[in-house]
């Protein structure tokens, strides 16, 4: 085995030696392991592809949810039962984001405490139940409540999944993989748009039934994820710190057999090793000290990126359909056709630019994508304000903007998930996602809904300028302070709190 226990622990003990001896706390036990180096040394394989598929489908679900919420806004206003106003639509979308904030914080804490894999199934079950319940909504309050619970499930998924991506994917592929998985959101967006085109057609389905069937589409798709999640093991990095070194070793051996056809013998390789003091959990006081004292500068970068992209994305995308219907006169059942090219640009951005995050580097690409998308939004907003764009021209403009904004938004999650120690990784994602979404995301849809209600293009343009300013400010902060984490082992980017000299 590649686990070497310190003299404080009897290394002649049998395989269950990872359990604490009577009277001995896990914090007193030290292991020396090469598991991180073995994981980073692997080539890309079918195992990693299965991880991408199994995790990416969650972002597909989120894309489906968000797109349905935007594409269905017109149908919700026309529903004889609900009869939503623009403000009601914005309020319900904000409830979804508020749920995501609460879910990220609660489940993020649990993810670091009880592991990544267990949370996969808890959060997915919540998402499925709440999405199905949304289809049964009978008023503004019930719809907002069920959207809140759906968001809580998706928010919890963010933390567990981004942590798992970082800890299972080799360092040289980490940036591109993270961006593509997060970018798969837009495959779900295309599915949501297609569903809306069919289900909102008044010649096929009644106005109060189509939007209900659309939400059931997400619940049905989510059932497939339960099977796909079986492919993913618990993070060996998490296991080795949380008193399960033998189980961590067994997981790595299984991964190596999948990749190489056989487990590697640590004795025949000069794998770099690290020494770790095992622990049951990390106290919240230590989490706070790590995020806001030890890594204060990294926290500034994470917050700036999260707030900017949350406002930029949620404010614009949640009100996408309202702009098309209110300013361009597009029928609610035709909005999906405009979302499809928009979704294509958003997915192609991470797919085509993602490799550059691992080659040109994090700082350069984060600065470029945030800065360009912010500048383009200001330009297109001005053209919108003077009436120079048709519905098709507006869609093309958004498609180009979000080709750059999509990898920028994904890079925010990449940054906060790889630049903090393993013990606080999931909660760090949750904290920065929650603050960013709380400030930039929850307020955004409601604000833009109110601006659109004014009927003034200049008012909407003012909102676009705010989003543009936030993105450009984030680009400046990233250029100055972002960490060059490309192709570096996680333990080099941020040493585990359990590290022993």
Image (cartoon, rainbow, N blue to C red):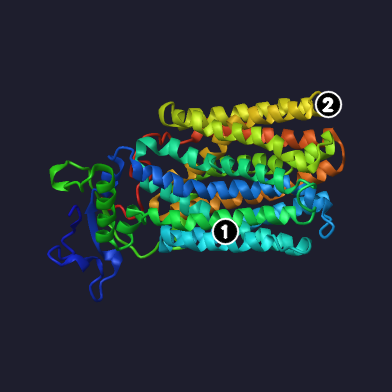
Regarding mark 2 in the picture, which secondary structure is present there?
A: loop
Q: Residue furthest bottom?
A: 22
Q: Residue at x 41, y 31 (%)?
A: 358
List the residue tagged with mark 2.
387
N-term-proximal mark, 1 vs 2: 1
Please indicate whether residue 47 sits to the left or right of residue 412 in the image: left
> Dot 2: few (<14), some (14–19), or many (≥20) neighbours within 10 Å?
few
Q: Residue furthest right?
A: 455
Q: Residue furthest front?
A: 204
List the residue tagged with mark 1.
153
Please indicate whether residue 275 sits to the left or right of residue 74 in the image: left
Image vertical order of residue 374 relative to residue 229, above or below: above
Q: Where residue 40 appears, x then y in whole percent?
A: 31, 41
**Is residue 150 in view?**
yes
Q: Quadrant of residue 49?
A: top left
Q: Where residue 388 appears, x then y in whole percent?
A: 81, 23
Image vertical order of residue 172 relative to residue 38, above or below: above
> Dot 1: few (<14), some (14–19), or many (≥20) neighbours within 10 Å?
many
**Is residue 101 in view?**
no
Regarding mark 1 in the picture, which secondary structure is present there?
A: helix
Q: Residue at x 78, y 60 (%)?
A: 140
Q: Where residue 112 appears, x then y in whole percent?
A: 43, 59
Please indicate whether residue 196 sits to the left or right of residue 112 in the image: right
Q: Alpha carbon of mark 1 to alpha carbon of mark 2: how far?
A: 40 Å
Q: Quadrant of residue 314?
A: top right
Q: Where residue 489 appears, x then y in whole percent?
A: 34, 41
Quadrant housing the N terminus: bottom left
């Amino acid at each position: 085995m590649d686990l070497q226990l310190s003299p404080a622990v009897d290394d002649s003990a049998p395989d269950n030696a990872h359990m604490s001896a009577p009277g001995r706390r896990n914090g007193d036990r030290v292991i020396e392991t090469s598991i991180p180096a073995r994981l980073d040394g692997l080539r890309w394989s079918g195992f990693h592809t299965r991880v991408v598929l199994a995790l990416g489908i969650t972002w597909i679900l989120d894309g489906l949810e968000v797109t349905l919420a935007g594409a269905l806004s017109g149908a919700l206003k026309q529903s004889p039962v609900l009869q939503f106003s623009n403000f009601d639509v914005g309020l319900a979308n904000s409830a979804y984001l508020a749920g995501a904030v609460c879910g990220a914080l609660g489940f993020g804490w649990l993810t670091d405490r009880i592991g990544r894999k267990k949370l996969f199934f808890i959060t997915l079950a919540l998402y499925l139940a709440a999405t199905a319940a949304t289809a049964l909504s009978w008023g503004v309050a019930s719809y907002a409540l069920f959207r809140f619970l759906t968001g809580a499930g998706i928010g919890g998924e963010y933390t567990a999944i981004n942590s798992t991506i970082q800890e299972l994917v080799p360092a040289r592929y980490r940036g591109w993989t993270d961006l593509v998985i997060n970018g798969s959101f837009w495959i779900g967006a295309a599915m949501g748009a297609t569903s809306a085109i069919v289900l909102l057609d008044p010649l096929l389905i009644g106005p109060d039934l189509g939007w209900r069937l659309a939400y059931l589409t997400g619940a049905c798709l989510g059932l497939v994820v339960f099977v796909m999640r079986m492919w993913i093991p618990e993070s060996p990095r998490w296991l080795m710190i949380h008193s399960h070194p033998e189980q961590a070793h067994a997981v790595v051996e299984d991964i190596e057999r999948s990749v190489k056809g056989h487990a590697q013998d640590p004795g025949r390789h000069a794998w770099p090793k690290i020494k770790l003091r095992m622990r049951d959990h990390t106290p919240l006081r230590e989490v706070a000290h790590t995020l806001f004292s030890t890594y204060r500068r990294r926290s500034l970068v994470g917050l700036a990126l999260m707030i900017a992209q949350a406002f930029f994305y949620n404010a614009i995308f949640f009100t996408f359909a309202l702009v098309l219907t209110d300013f361009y006169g597009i029928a609610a059942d035709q909005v999906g056709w405009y979302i499809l090219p928009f979704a294509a640009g958003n997915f192609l951005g991470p797919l085509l630019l993602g490799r550059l995050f691992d080659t040109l580097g994090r700082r350069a690409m984060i600065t470029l994508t945030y800065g360009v998308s912010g500048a383009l939004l200001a330009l297109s907003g001005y053209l919108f304000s003077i009436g120079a764009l048709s519905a098709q021209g507006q869609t093309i403009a958004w498609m180009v903007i979000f080709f750059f904004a999509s990898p920028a938004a994904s890079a925010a999650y990449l940054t906060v998930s790889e630049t903090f120690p393993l013990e606080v990784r999931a909660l760090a994602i949750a904290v920065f996602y929650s603050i960013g979404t709380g400030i930039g995301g929850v307020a955004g849809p409601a604000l833009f809904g109110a601006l659109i209600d004014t009927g003034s293009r200049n008012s909407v343009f003012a909102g676009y300028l705010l989003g543009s300013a936030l993105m450009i400010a984030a680009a400046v902060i990233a250029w100055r302070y972002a960490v060059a984490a490309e192709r570096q082992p996680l333990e080099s980017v941020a040493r585990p709190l359990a590290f022993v000299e």
